[in-house]
Image (tube, rainbow, N blue to C red):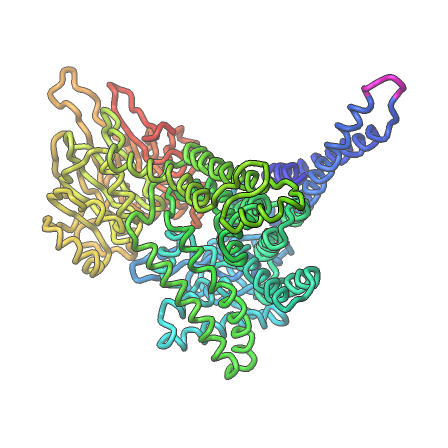
Amino acid sequence: MAAASWVAAALAVRAGSREACIAAAVLAGTAALSLVLALIPSAPGTRLFPLAGRLARTVAAPLAAAGMVCVGAGVLLAERTAGPIGPAISAGASITGEFRASIDARAVASDRFDGGSRYAVEAVLTEATAGGARFGAAATVLVLGGGSFADVHLGDRFSAAGNLQAAGPGERAVALLYANGTPDVEPAGGWYGQTAQIRVALAHAAAGQADILGEDAAGLLPGMVLGDRSTLDKDLEAAMQNTGLTHLTAVSGANCGYLLAFVFLTARSARLPRAVASAAGVLALVGFVLVVRPDASVLRAAVMGGLGTLAVLSGRGKLPAALLCLSITVLLAVDPWLSGSYAFILSVLATSGLILLGPRLTELLSRRMPWPLAAALAVPLAAQLFCSPVLVLLQPQVPVYSLPANIVAAPVIPLVTVAGMAAAVLTAALPPLAAPLLLVAGAGAAWTSFVARFFSSLPGALLPWPGGATGVMLMAGAGVAVIWVVLRAGKAGSTVSTVSAGETANASSAASAGRPRGRGGPAVDLTAAVPLAVALLLLPPAAVAAWTYLMPGPAPPGWSAVVCDVGQGDGLVVRTAEHSALVIDAGPDPEAMDGCLNRLGVKTVDLLILTHAHLDHYGGTEGVLRQREVHRIAFSTAEAELPPQLDAHLKGSGAELTRLTAGMSAQTGPVKWDVLWPPKDSQQATENDASAVVLVSLDPDPDAQPAEPRLTMLLTGDIEQDAALALLSRNAWLRTDGVDVLKVPHHGARNGGTALITQLRPRVALISVGADNDYGHPGPAILSALEDTGTTVARTDLLGSISLDMDGKTLRVGGLDGR
């Protein structure tokens, strides 16, 4: 039933409302027919109807559930695009709208070195004005704006103006709005307003205790208690990600589970009946959800975390498994977009692990340790085993110390959750009474931050892992091996035979001596079984790491240029000799850039070009400089100087530094490069428009007869539309000559415009972009222009690192890993 609901939701949200409603009618009719068939009595002496009846009973419930999900999706899709808003979205109209925030604003990126952030707010558009006409709407829109949106909270009403852009199929928001200016915000009243006050009050109170708690704890506490990560230090956030502790900074199933476990165990220690303890835990969880805010993500976390924890605490897997399937169906019917949410997928997997494996693990471990400690160990291990295949799909790295970090941090999480929630409420109502609780919760947050930083600093904290389907299959295989060991251990250990009265003394003496009793074979010694299970989990990452570092994959033969997959950023390598290259930008991550250059066998960098001073283009510079000889470094920026940290790093390399301006040119081996932008002595208004635009020409064999065609590549940094038009005006010959390869400006953002695409008509367009980025890159208008010009598009979010090579007159483009 749950699987059918999930498939139906995933397909329905990608279809139109009409298609979803038709599918719902077909599924409902088929389910009804199945029930009728199941009730038809069988003819004497025949097997046809009994078999058909059993089959009908089996499929009726899944078909009905899928139909219910499709009905919900169809109604919601129709409601969101009803009226004039549908055509306005399709036309990319400019609107002024009234919105009601569905979530708190969240920072999605820092576009400038000075730390200025962009914010995203998912909101319901209730009224809009477009083309002079005002109309009502109920469309869910993702509003992207500047720092003035930081104070928008759930339930707030605000007005904003900007251009609409249709979202992709299956997205929760039907459109994106790139907002201009400052929103006019009307704070929410009632429960939403009180909740916002609690969140703000806790953040301010924690910041006020930073001298006592420490900066890490003060910034982490709001995230651990209320899921508010706005005050979390970036370095600490990275450390928690590298140790598998990120779930503690969101309102996840783990938070809900720990609260439920704390209340349940406290009630049981007071000798309350199991039913009363369970009811107390559920009531506490309901209160927690109401305080944190009952939006879809919190309800999902509460349902999944609550069911999983009850399965472990009660030791009963069958009933929670049935409730899990029912909960998945209901949640998908209410919010079918959860079907594509990685958070929802991970919640379901973690809860499945706790239900299917948690009780067995807890029972096994409790033979060698106190039961509460066994349960604390079983929870993260079971969840990690089931979630790992999806986690490596999101990030092809394995946090080696995730299990010990979670185990060490786990004892303080109930303390932080319970004391922190009480402190949050009292901080907004009676601040003097909140101070002791705030210090107690802050001590737990301080311990958590210490654990994260300690384990992330250990050698080999992150091991590389293959990306894509290969990585998922390998991790799934490792998980299956561990689960098999655990289940085998549980099966052997649970074998018990009856003992006669005369054998009781011998059995007792055998047990006291540590020997197994019964006739079902020896019980498995967990001192060996558990380490073996953990070893099996870590063996594949260790093998992959050894292979990666000791036996790096060979560079593809004959490559001319490679766009390195650096995530949301740019990093491009052009071959100048056997082990030498020209490098244009370094992406945001030193490890990604260093790994790409290692694979290509680049030992000497003839020239490193940093097109402009944004972190997603220069953040990986240290990786380029690492154990390589770098002859020259050239850069462009709108500022008088480079950012101080970058400037010090570059000067420390000993390489010659040059500021780029139009007219510069040089050649190294077969590679010639010409700077076309920015103009000399021309100050650019923005850092993006100060991007160096470089024309790279490759002539593999200039003496060959007949001469082989030359490969030309226009590398554009993050140049925006107006600067692109000025570039074409200053270099009119580009329209005539064209280029073979265009690095699409600004990762395919719509503000790069389409002029370079339509006027140069390149054979190949390269888009260096992070998968599932928050910017919506590449924009639909950019992709449409590339399609209209017949340009082949190669994207790093789809292909990984991309290689280019000239074979005679043929330009070959493909993923470095065969994608």
Relative image position of residue 596 (x, y in whole percent): 26, 38
Q: Can residue 79 be seen in this view?
A: no
Q: Is residue 74 visible?
A: yes
Identify which residue is drawn at 61% across, 71% down.
189
Relative image position of residue 149 (x, y in whole percent): 46, 63
Q: Is residue 605 found left or right of 753 in the rendered image?
A: left
Q: Is residue 370 found left or right of 806 in the rendered image?
A: right
Relative image position of residue 731 (x, y in whole percent): 23, 40
Identify which residue is drawn at 65% across, 45% down.
502
- Which quadrant holds the N terminus? top right
Relative image position of residue 364 (x, y in whole percent): 53, 47
Q: Is residue 117 found left or right of 139 in the rendered image?
A: left
Tally of numbered tags = 0
Q: Compared to 468, does 637 lie above or below? A: below
Identify which residue is drawn at 25% across, 53% down.
613
Q: Compared to 183, does 464 lie above or below? A: above
Q: Is residue 587 found left or right of 142 in the rendered image?
A: left
Q: In which quarter of the image is residue 325?
A: top right
132 or 792, nearer to the observer? 792
264 or 431, nearer to the observer? 264
Q: Compared to 551, does 652 lie above or below? A: below
Identify which residue is drawn at 40% across, 65% down.
447
- Which quadrant holds the C terminus? top left
Residue interval drawn in magenta: 43-48
250 or 181, nearer to the observer? 250
> Of helix, strand and loop, which mostly describes the magenta segment?
loop
